[in-house]
Image: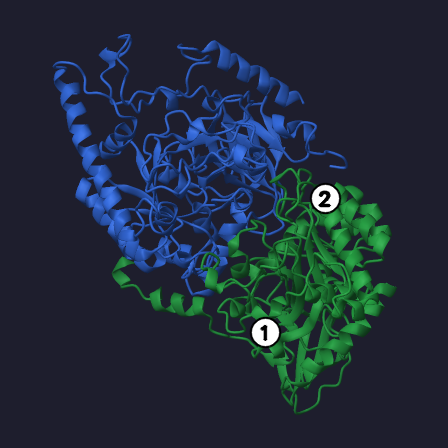
Amino acid sequence: MTMNMRLRAAAVASALACLAAVSVPAQTIAITGGKVFPVSGPPIENGIVLIRNGKIVSVGANVTVPADAQRIDATGKLVTPGLFDAATQLGLVEIGQVSETRDTRAQGKDNIAAAFTVWDGLNPNSVLLAPARKEGVTTFAIMPSGGLVSGQAAVVDLVDGTTTDMIVRSPSAMVAEIGDAQQAGVASRGELLVKLRELLEDTKFFITHRAAFDRAETRDFRASRLDLEAMIPVVQGRLPLLVAVDQVSDIDAAMRLARQYDIKLIIGGGAEAWMMADKIAAAHIPVLTGAMNNIPSSFSSLGQRQENAALLTAAGVKVALVGNAGGGDEEAFNVRNIRSEAGNAVAYGMSWENALRGVTLAPAEIFGVADRLGTLQPGREANVVVWSADPFEFSTRAEHVLIRGIERTNETTRQDLLTQRYMNLPPAVIK
Amino acid sequence: MRVLNSILVLASVAALGCAGTTPTPAPTPAQSVSRDSVPPNLAGRGGVSLPNADPFPSTYVPFPSRTLVIRNVSIMTAAGPTIRNGSVLVQNGKITAVGATVDAPSDAVVIDGTGKYVTPGIIDVHSHIGVYAAPGGNALSDGNEATNPVTANVWAEHSVWPQDPQFPRILAGGVTTLQVLPGSANLIGGRSAILKVVPSRTVQGMKFPGAKYGLKMACGENPKRVYQNRGPSTRMGNVAGYRAAWIQAEAYRRRWDKWNADHKGDPPSRDLGLETLAEVLRGNILVHNHCYRADEMGQMIDIAHEFGYKIRSFHHGVEAYKVADLLGKEGIGASVWADWGSFKMEAMDAIKANLALVDRAAGSHGMIHSDDPSGSQRLNQEVSKAMAAGIAAGIPVTEDQALKWMTINPAWALGLDDKIGSIEKGKNADLVLWSADPFSVYARAEKVWIDGALMYDRSDPTQQWRTDFELGFVPTRNR
């Protein structure tokens, strides 16, 4: 938890500048009559969420609603924080196999691309943003991929604006992929760790020999100057290292490395994490994982099972649920399915409350933005969704979606336009 | 291990005891349905190989079953409205009664389904399980014979690994029948295999007795990408490729049909690929055509008209909704995802209401498919998403209609709608007992029966099939 506090302080500092640029509506909105799930506390029957100038100002059963407030009647409905997808390539990929619309990975140098700031490739005009927003996703974390060190991740809100407007925290993590030696440009798992260790050692050396480096009086480093620079907050414990890793022995190795270098670790994927859930919990390492993966789809994930998230949570691990069971290129198209990922987590042993936490507060805590996002509490961004019923059910609709206090309801997506265009076939051809 | 042990024993009896003879017990009625177009008097003439025969016959035998009655259960039949608080009776592997009440013999196994649901077994018409087996890698990559744009000569069943650990997972998701197709690298990719989701040492032991073969064809981006250096490298090249193949097939069919009629001289020489295509022209093999775009569907329909064959279903038809009326008029099915899109240019116009829009057109056969071992485990959830999207678009889809998208409609696409796909008297007892309404995200398949035999029981680890591959390798700790 102390690590989180450290992160949080850094988050506030880095995020304030971005926020100032976003225009906020000077209005008061009251969501009334619904069952409110603040996530930070127990549900409130017939609760009121009061929003002013894009922020939540009060939440409770006995909140005075100003006369001039715009009212949203949520009677019989559920009110939750906006959903947070903790690992996606939404906005980085428009059409998977059209390479000019893919901005997920860097060329890097020798499979190291620590300096790569993935958010610079985020397309705020992607037509895939609106469908996610329309189904209650208000925040997501974009991840670079590929190589050994893939680059830097960021947390963004689904506001309608520029990338600058959207960014909540950048970087939010350094991403590395340690399950695949070939991809890392080495011959074995052990050598992969050697290469990562070399990068960490070089970064530490670089910090203390900066002047000599600039005079070209140091030995050559395998990583570039910018990559070394980017790794500094990682070795100083200020920026978490998110390792995409599935096999339990690789998780163990990553944890050894993290202990040795005092690095703050996040496990991403973690197919076999359940096998050492207690140790992961004891080390206070959070895990981003799905709840719909159970296929031994590689020799690194033979132990993959749907109960992974539930078993980790039960052991005390902080778990953020991430989407995309199939793992395919359609991921960005279906960020909206994060809510059914949560539903499946419940079907396979997680409590409903923990599943909701896994798509709201848990990712906010993991990425150090819980002071801004993830709960319905005074002072938080007004990312709020009113659901017709249980948000995890397919038949449930997101009836109101507010992002930083701006209502995004009834947004027409490209998919809606196509549907409308072909809705009206000649009556004679209808069954 | 009670059930699985008896399964293994039975399977070995069937496999060992039937080389060249009829397996015991007696074949089901399905097995007596011949798909051959060979004159029976040719059989047994050593040295003359038999075109269109059944050289890899099914050795499937239903697993042991007992008379079974499920009572007090919501029965979603795919043949009419849901029967609340009803009963289903299963005898000798068949559904023998269904209704508000049934007369069950005293020795029947009785299952109380209070609060639960029964549906027909789910049918996945588009799978690559077995040909792209887990854990993957080159060694198990057997789905695309990407050496020639037309490989009508290959059969998916010759790539299927029965020990693929993905099979038991889809069984646990309620899938009882699947079509395994070759991949989509080729214009014409080869024959499909129609399999029951059962443990077997050989693929023949999984083959659905009497099922017609399918032929995989593919439109658009994949073939022209794979063959860009040798051709086809364009969509027009694709179309020229299909037509050239059918011209050859038509000539081959005439040669053989003539010889089969008069037996004059030596038989024409055999060509495995043309043999398969000729069987399509004769109507004995069903065409399953991977095709995303509406305009390409229009072209494939014209090619089918030109050569006189029928397309049974367009698969991955993300734009099927644009030509729903055309598909209905032609009697062509649409096999689609609920919500896959944007992974390639030709998938850009995917909409979630696709299935509801297609299935609303007169004459249409809309259905869900997976193309994915993860999605295949949750086709009920995929259907639920498609239903919700249809309703949101203003199309009044009911659960009873949506159920057909994963049961009787895919059964029709496989030509098996007289045997499976609905809960009706006389049908095979392929059933799934769900813990809740199957369209809820929380519903799980509790029990799955195939031909009346209990093949999966969530509450009993000894009744959960584990493939050879998983033994020892896949951890069971704390499961």
Q: Is residue B403 left or right of residue A249?
A: left
Picture layout, residue A134 above or below residue B198:
below
Quarter of the view holding residue B34:
top left
Quarter of the view holding residue B469:
top right
The chain coloured blue carries which letter? B
The chain coloured green carries which letter? A
Q: Is residue A276 left or right of residue B252?
A: right
Measure how far apart labels 2 and 1 are at the Cα level: 51 Å
Picture layout, residue B205 above or below residue A10:
above
Q: Is residue A379 visible?
A: yes
**Which residue corresponds to the image point at 77% horizontal and 76% vertical from the top-left?**
A12
Label drawn at residue A113: none
- To which residue does mark 1 refer? A400
Q: Is B323 in front, or is B469? A: B469
Q: What residue type is disc 1 on? A: His
Indicate the chain on which mark 2 is placed: A
Q: Is residue A295 left or right of residue B25?
A: right
Q: Position of residue B370 (x, y in %)?
A: 48, 45
Label 2 element class = helix
Quarter of the view holding residue A352:
bottom right
Q: Is residue B427 visible?
A: no
Indicate how the structure is coloured in the image. Answer: by chain
Figure quadrant of the C terminus of chain B = top right
Q: Which numbered disc flags the more N-terminal residue, 2 or 1?
A: 2
Q: Is A172 in front, or is A159? A: A172
Picture layout, residue A130 above or below residue A108:
below
Q: Is B171 in front, or is B471? A: B471
- To which residue does mark 2 refer? A191
Label 1 element class = strand
Indicate the chain on which mark 1 is placed: A
